[in-house]
Amino acid sequence: MFCAPVCIPVPPSTPFNVLIGEIFLGVYGEHPDFVAIDWDEVVWFKSGHKFTPRFDLSLAENGLGHKDVIRFKTPGLKGIKGSGS
Amino acid sequence: MDATVKRKKMGLKQRYQTMTRGLDWTTSYQDMDKVFPYDKYEGIKVHNWDEWEDPFRLTMEAYWKYQGEKEKKLYAVIDAFAQNNGQLGISDARYVNALKLFIQGVTPLEYCAHRGFAHVGRHFTGVGARVAAQMQSIDELRHYQTETHALSHYNKYFNGMHESNYWYDRVWYLSVPKSFFEDAMSGGPFEFLVAISFSFEYVLTNLLFVPFMSGAAHNGDMSTVTFGFSAQSDESRHMTLGIECIKFLLEQDSANAPIVQRWIDKWFWRGYRLLTLVAMMQDYMLPKRVMSWKEAWEMYAESNGSALFKDLARYGIREPKGWQDACEGKDHISHQAWNTFYTYNAAAAFHTWVPNEEEMQWLSEKYPQSFDQYYRPRLDHYDKQHKQGQRFYNKTLPMLCQVCQIPMLFTEPNDPTSICYRESDYADDKYHFCSDHCKEIFDHEPEKYVQAWLPVHQIYQGNCFPEGTDPTVEGFDPLAAVMEYYRINVGSDNFDFADSEDRRNFTEWQAGEEPQVSP
């Protein structure tokens, strides 16, 4: 559904859990599987390498800077009818 | 006794020689390197310009006559098309969206080509290359004009065409063709020829023109078909220039080969990425389909292209680095691009839609490896949502590739479920790419590409609002301000075809109501 990664302009002081709870909801909330995501099981990547964010800390405190790229995988969820989308 | 000496009329070849050679001189007040400042710095060695074989062999006199004849025929057809309300005879109003894409994204490239060839036509020291580039410059201007004239009739009846020149310089997806051509024009003259004449015109142009023109023929658009015929003989001259320039450079000095190879690698990939728009048009925007992108790629690129690179192997040239990845992408790129425009259609000046059942069936037959598994399920989902009044529009701006400027929509070679993503660090900043090949282009000339005007970054920096906009006022809607700056009429130029004024109008006209010319 989401054709490409998105650019999110936010201050470095934004808490990581605000990113998930508010910002991601606005960005990805329309995906039928969004509500089924178990955030404790999500696998995170920063620039292609695994990383483990602390949800209670800010983006900066999690080591994220300008134009850093994060991706996440949602184990058990395979997209619309298993299409990976 | 006076005898009138009858001078023998010159043959065509001789006349051509007289009119194109020996007209220049070696400057003495100014150093030749100052008069021709660009033809050495790229490192290309030319020992003897006289070995250049002119690809066109047309004198200006013959050129005017020949083109004049073609124009007469073309404008007669355009006039008849307008007189007879030819726009009513097209297959379906959805087809016009292919024309919108053409006037927005392709026609301005003709104008850039006109400028680019005029520029290099001034800067080669070799007269043969100068004449060829100047002739092509005139062709390109003619194409820009005739395309604009052929399509202007549609502009009277359909949305999404009224600001095409203005859009070209501003709207996010049009930065893809714009940055492609400006990259070529800001290279040296030899790189420009390898980029445009060889890599684009010779290797890839059939993949641009054939789909649009045969698409027009299949969909009842005689006006565009006639333009296509009128441009075709020019295009074949342009292709001849492409192959001549590459052979000339490679035959002049073996040290030219690695420089030329790097340009071929770069410009094949840049051109291939640009053609993503054509792939999408072919598979999704033509109500009556000609052939799939995959079939066109196999016919024009895979078979013709591999023969060409076999032929060039004797100069030490191999197929472009991105070739395998481009071939692998044939099952995917059209679907991925359509999904991008479908989901970002609130910000695009043409309409998108979910294909109907028969079209889905066609896609499934043409793309047995990919369509049903990866692409059909989300289209079915969108369709369901739309029917429930919840047409999906993505509201967050996408990340763009720093080089090709396309949203990062392409997947990893051999893994259609992961977005392909590369990055480079340069001078304290991070840059993102859609592929190994775009990354390599950046890494070779980072100072050039860090200057890219990326629409998404520009929007976030506040550079794409109408002048005088105050983004701090209560209730400010940034995307509405961007649309206003773009001069995209929200509600008529954008959104789903099903909900469009184009569709409503066309349906009424088909039912016999008189078409109204929009003011």
Image (spheres, coloured by chain):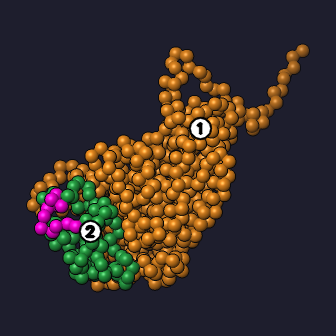
Chain colours: A green, B orange
On-image quarter of the N terminus of chain B:
top right
**Secondary structure under badge 1?**
loop
B491 above or below B7? below
Q: Position of residue B33 (x, y in %)?
A: 51, 25
Q: Position of residue B101 (x, y in %)?
A: 44, 62
On-image quarter of the C terminus of chain B:
bottom left
Magenta residue check for A57: yes
Disc number lying in front (1 or 2): 2
The residue shown at (37%, 84%) is A81
Q: Position of residue B424 (x, y in %)?
A: 35, 52
Q: Which residue is mark 2?
A: A44
A62 above or below B197? below
The numbered dot on residue B255 is 1
The residue shown at (58%, 54%) is B319
Amino acid type at circle 2 is Trp
Q: Position of residue A1 (x, y in %)?
A: 34, 74
- Based on the displayed image, in which of its 4 quarters is residue B406 positioned? bottom left
